[in-house]
Image: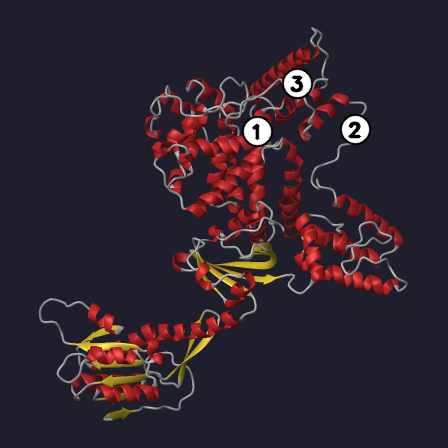
Amino acid sequence: MEEQNLNFDFEEDGVTNGPQQKATFTEVQFGPMRLYEDQLQVLLVFAKEDSQSSGFCWACEKADFSCSVARTPESALECHLQKHHDIIIIDHRHSRYFDAEALCRSIRAVSFSENTVIVAVVKRPEREESSVMPLITAGFNRRYVENPSVAACYNELLQLQHGEVRAQLKLRACNAIFTAVEQSQEAIEITSEDQVIQYVNPAYESIMGYQHGELIGKELLEVPKSEKNKPDLLDSINSCIQMGKEWQGVYYTMKKNGDSVPQSVKITPVIGQGGKIRHYVSVNRPLNDNNKTDKSCDRVQAESQTDNQSCKHKDRRKGSLDVRSTTSRGSDGSSQRRHSSMARIHSMTIEAPITKVINIINAAQESSPVPVAEALDRVLEILRTTELYSPQLGTKDEDPHTSDLVGGLMTDGLRRLSGNEYIFAANKPHHLPSHLSTPLSLGDIPPRIAQTMENEESWDFDVFTLEAATMKRPLTYLGLKIFSRFGVCEFLGCPEATLRSWLQVIEANYHSSNSYHNSSHAADVLHATAYFLCKERVKQSLDPIDEVAALIAATVHDVDHPGRTNSFLCNAGSELAVLYNDTAVLESHHAALAFQITTRDDKCNIFKNMERNEYRTLRQAIIDMVLATEMTKHFEHVNKFVNSINKPLAALEESGGNGDEDSVKGILTSPENRILVKRMLIKCADISNPCRPLELCIEWAGRISEEYFAQVMQLQACSVDSRGGGQIRHATVEEIHNGVCM
């Protein structure tokens, strides 16, 4: 082997801060991992010594790189096998000495040369620039146009060191990371931003029963899901991780053989290029592989039963839970109590939050005096009720009408009309009527209509004046202006013509025959929503997607409202009530119909240009806000809002003026609290009539009274028909609201 070694070794300790400072190694940060870059090894392959090879030799000395020079392909391969160079520079100018591309392919054939950077020195082109593809195909990383200047060679080496070589150093470190992932006992799954599976480790294959090739490249939606999860759990997870938040909890996964496995799951979004989420990493750990007790307790969580026979026994305190055995308490009472407490604490990792609270109280009971234990028993009785946030009203004999009215507003009051005579059709067609004129652009709105909307940003805006000016079509015009102000078209990626068509078709599906629940009410709620969105605290809490969701939800929240209450429809046996199982009938219909008529025709489909994940997040937010307008859940939403937002903010303000800004922001921007803010925002907008200027308030009160009166008249007609006589019995206020007449 003909070889020339020029080794410049320096024993100076320290860290290299620049190209002139010499050291034995350089620290390189790779995420949380610290790497050490040794003195670079450079191999020069030149058949004869010339100014170009000398330039690289002196550049290596200047950069403190160890340099070897080989004259033949054979000596180059032998030298590389011994020293494992970081950079190999091959003379590609003279083909008569050796084939540079063949040598490069031979080096690449060596297993450990994958991370070696190979550079081809080429002649300066005399005419047209030639393609570099043959070099890339042969395995070269880079091309260097001949320039014997030591400075040029030195700069080239520095670029290689801080570019390709350092990138290869990090790629080599990935081997260690992948080895750790491959050896992990926890199931690890990596997906793309579009939730396409990119990697699963052997533990995942072992636990789930799938082979690597069966999953890679598939979308998560294609993998079978367990039916044991709550219906809205997957949407909650997606909403959380798509906002860049980590999600952790218990999730049932389905194995290839169809078995459902409860796992402790942690999903972490990985931010990449452009500051966007590029990957999701899911780490799963089975909860019950080797513990039958855990399995039975997991059934308690999955089935929402706290008194499952396999996981409990009762002691002197009601509801005490012992997951260790079902035997009665023995003579060693204190020992049994310790076992019971430890078992409860151990089981907390797989229990629902309310079960954790109950178990903590149970554990506290065992070391408490009898009066405290009895008080905690009463606490447990309250916690085990289903409606934790719904108030319990005491009756007031002195005011039966008020009691009737409030009871009617807060309860479903399901009592059937005789014969179910009143039926609403749930399947009537909904389309854009042909008589509607071609929508105008925002700039072409008639002056008289534009004038009525000049103060639409003010709380005192008069929607009735706009109603008269637009001939009972205020929603389209007000919607155009408000949506333009908030940049909704830009966010959705849809043209203004599509938005105009959508507003028209939505307004066409409001019943102008209703005195209250018509498009004027929708326009009023839209105006109030836009007004609230401009408030500073609301802007601190919500993102642009939340604002768009709020405006759309306000627009559609009562679409196709029949002018009758939910209770009336349920008691009348309407098709809508049957379709939605007597639960949030109208609100479910409004949300479902809004999406049906939007996606039915591309001309009015404002969502058609959105990315799928963003559309799903927006859709979920719209549905949640529309469903929040149901009055039977009013106090539940209000109490959650007060306890989760109002009280913590008040406590911060009391402790230090306006409170720490980061703490305030943390409260307002948490995913759960943002949902509560959006719910309260649309609820306040929906029932804001009493807060409007007096003349507007009076008009709204008259309209809703007229609509209720029409329901009462229909109710009384049903009462006459059901008795076959002409007498009408006076109904109570609650019966009028519920649509029930005995």
The outermost residue toward the right is 331
What is the three-letter code of the residue carrying label 3? Gly
Using the image as rendered, state which of residue 299 and residue 656 is in the foreground.
Answer: 299
Residue under circle 3? 419
Look at the numbered disc 3 and give the secondary structure of its residue.
Answer: helix
What is the three-letter code of the residue carrying label 1? Leu
**Foreground mark, 2 or 3?**
3
Q: Residues within 10 Å of mark 2 (few under 14, many from 20)?
A: few
Q: Earlier in the sequence, mark 2 or mark 3?
A: 2
Q: Which quadrant of the figure has residue 691?
A: top right
Residue under circle 2? 395
In the image: residue 682, left or right of residue 95: right
**Foreground mark, 3 or 1?**
3
Residue 566 x %, y %: 61, 27
Q: Which quadrant of the figure has residue 44?
A: bottom left
The outermost residue toward the top is 726
Residue under circle 1? 586
Using the image as rendered, state which of residue 557 and residue 464 is in the foreground.
Answer: 557
- State whether residue 460 appears in this view: no
Residue 5 to residue 586: above or below = below
Q: Which quadrant of the figure has residue 571?
A: top right
The alpha-carbon separation of the residues under discs 2 and 3 comes to 31 Å
Q: Earlier in the sequence, mark 1 or mark 2?
A: 2
Residue 606 x %, y %: 40, 36
Residue 403 to residue 721: above or below = below
In the image: residue 684, left or right of residue 497: right
Using the image as rendered, state which of residue 21 and residue 163 is in the foreground.
Answer: 163
